[in-house]
Amino acid sequence: MPGVTTATSINGVLDANAKKILTNVLKESVEMSGVSQLLQRVPVPNLVGSIPVASAGSVDEDLDEFEHSDVNGGKFYNLEYNLKKDRVKLMSSDEAEIKSLKGSPLSIQVSASAMQLSATLDKKSAEALDTAPQTVSAATLWDTPTNNIYKEISRAKALMKPYKPDAIIMTQDVYDAYISNDTLLTLATGNPTVMQNSEGIMPGTSLNIFVDDNITAKSAILCKSQVCGAIGQGPVKARQWDDGDSGAKVYQYDVFRQAKDCIFKNSSDENMAAVQITGLIS
């Protein structure tokens, strides 16, 4: 049964307390994080809250002596949080704990749960960035190998000023076209990866590449990390109990969190730190 550790599914172990299991689940989920690392973390200990942010104002240039200027600051608005919980529930049978010799009978499930927690937050983060980015339609298709992929990158970067993007999120089919493009093959230099779990860096840029199908089909999103969005992080509730009917120990962890886009908006209420290029492949 999925989510249940039996005597036949382990390779010998000692009992592990709930705190250690929880720590390992959360630690491994952070290590596996992809798109979610691009969003800033914000503590929301009471599950609900408003974080005031402001849109960019304007600047009056080259004023003469004693020349008057109007107030030109940005408008204020709130990031509203109402955190929901993501739950991990594990079970270890009495037989698994008795027959085990060393380690933890839940070690395999801990890694699997961490992977799913990470994937869930990556999904939420990608969907948040896909909510209200600035957009530009591709004029150059990437699945035509001879087309220059950097033309679209340049157009998107121009929209993001003054922010300089340091990451790009592509759907899988866009990434497949990207790695098959002649321009890339000509420029590839083996740049090292800067952000953990990214696919690498786009040659000639500072863009870390992430692949995620939770954004609009056939698109890519350029963004500035830590500015393009924020994840509200709440408490983690841990429970453990013996299930006498099943003859097993149950561990349950509720992780409260929520991903939001748009820390800073432009006059059209679009994310100033994210630009989406649509229609990149036919």
Image (cartoon, grey):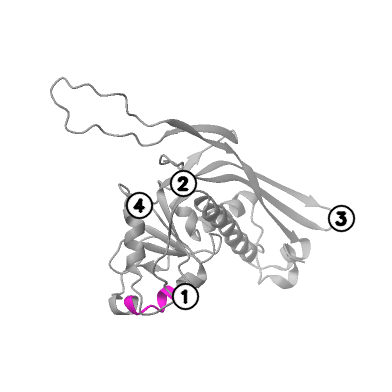
Q: Out of 139 and 104, give the one closest to the viewer.
A: 139
Which residue carries the number 4 mark?
Answer: 159
Q: Count every numbered label the image shows and give the total.
A: 4
Q: Which mark is residue 245?
A: 3
Q: Earlier in the sequence, mark 3 or mark 4?
A: 4
Q: Out of 11 and 142, give the one closest to the viewer.
A: 142
Quarter of the figure with the N terminus? bottom right
Q: In this picture, is 15 found above or below 187?
A: above
The stretch of residues the image draws in magenta is 177-183
Asked which secondary structure carries label 2, the reply is strand
Q: Which mark is residue 233?
A: none
Residue 104 visible to an observer of this rendering: no
Q: Which mark is residue 176?
A: 1
Which numbered disc, 1 or 4, marks the residue closer to the eye?
Answer: 4
Residue 271 visible to an observer of this rendering: yes
Residue name at image x 41 percent, y 78 percent: 144
Is 50 on the left-hand or right-hand side of 237? left
Q: Earlier in the sequence, mark 1 or mark 3?
A: 1
Which residue carries the number 2 mark?
Answer: 229
In the rendered image, residue 259, in percent from the top left (x then y), is placed at 54, 47
Residue name at image x 45 percent, y 68 percent: 280
Is 172 on the left-hand or right-hand side of 71? right
